[in-house]
Image (spheres, rainbow, N blue to C red):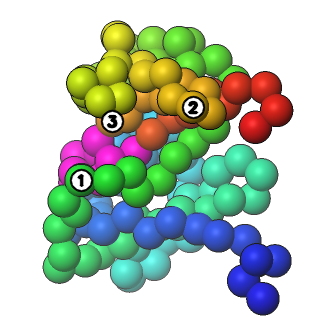
Amino acid sequence: MLADRRAHAVLPTGDVDALRPFYEEVLGFTPHAVLASGVAYRAGDGSLFVISRSAGISTGAFTQIGFTVPDIEAEVAELRGRGVVFEEYEAPKTEGGIARMPVGRAAWFRDPAGNLLVIVQFDQGF
């Protein structure tokens, strides 16, 4: 069943080559596989995501992929230093780009294609 399978995310873009520098140079990912249809990247614990050539455009209306971090303040500071701009929201209320959530703290940002990404520092026990 699917509950026993590794999950992955697919992020759409009209221009894979233009989006690659953001994921590789800004976020620090190394390509796992470069295909005609997109680029696959490995992340922690065997997870995988793909930026995929698509005629569809991301609305950015919802979180499309999340990354767990041990220290959200340090991660936000490092990413800001690399030019990442964090979203500011009223609900959930962000302060300095970071929001308190029921499971921990989170900060959202967009890639140049408009895909919405989140970093999350989970509370103990989650």
Residue 84 in view = no
Sequence-wise, the earlier of marks 1 and 3 is: 1
Q: Locate residue 65 relative to residue 57 in the image: left or right.
A: right
Q: Nearer the viewer, residue 95 or 81?
A: 95
Q: Which amino acid does label 3 sit on?
A: Phe
Q: Which of 123 and 26 is in front in this view?
A: 123
Which residue in the protein does label 2 denote?
102
Which residue in the protein does label 3 denote?
109
Q: Which amino acid does label 1 sit on?
A: Gly
Residue 55 in view = yes
Q: Give the crowd class for mark 2: few <14, some 14-19, many >=20 residues within 10 Å.
A: few
Quarter holding residue 105:
top right
Q: Nearer the viewer, residue 45 or 28?
A: 45
Is 115 covered by the magenta stretch?
Answer: yes
Q: Position of residue 9 (x, y in %)?
A: 50, 66
Q: Quadrant of the C terminus?
A: top right
Q: Position of residue 16 (x, y in %)?
A: 29, 64
Q: Residue at x 82, y 32 (%)?
A: 125
Q: Position of residue 37 (x, y in %)?
A: 37, 81
Stretch in magenta: 110-117
Q: Position of residue 42 (x, y in %)?
A: 63, 57
Characterize the magenta stretch by its predominant secondary structure.
loop
Q: What residue type is labelled 2?
A: Pro
Is 97 covered by the magenta stretch?
Answer: no
Sequence-wise, the earlier of marks 3 and 2 is: 2
Q: Which residue is drawn at 33% across and 35% down?
A: 109
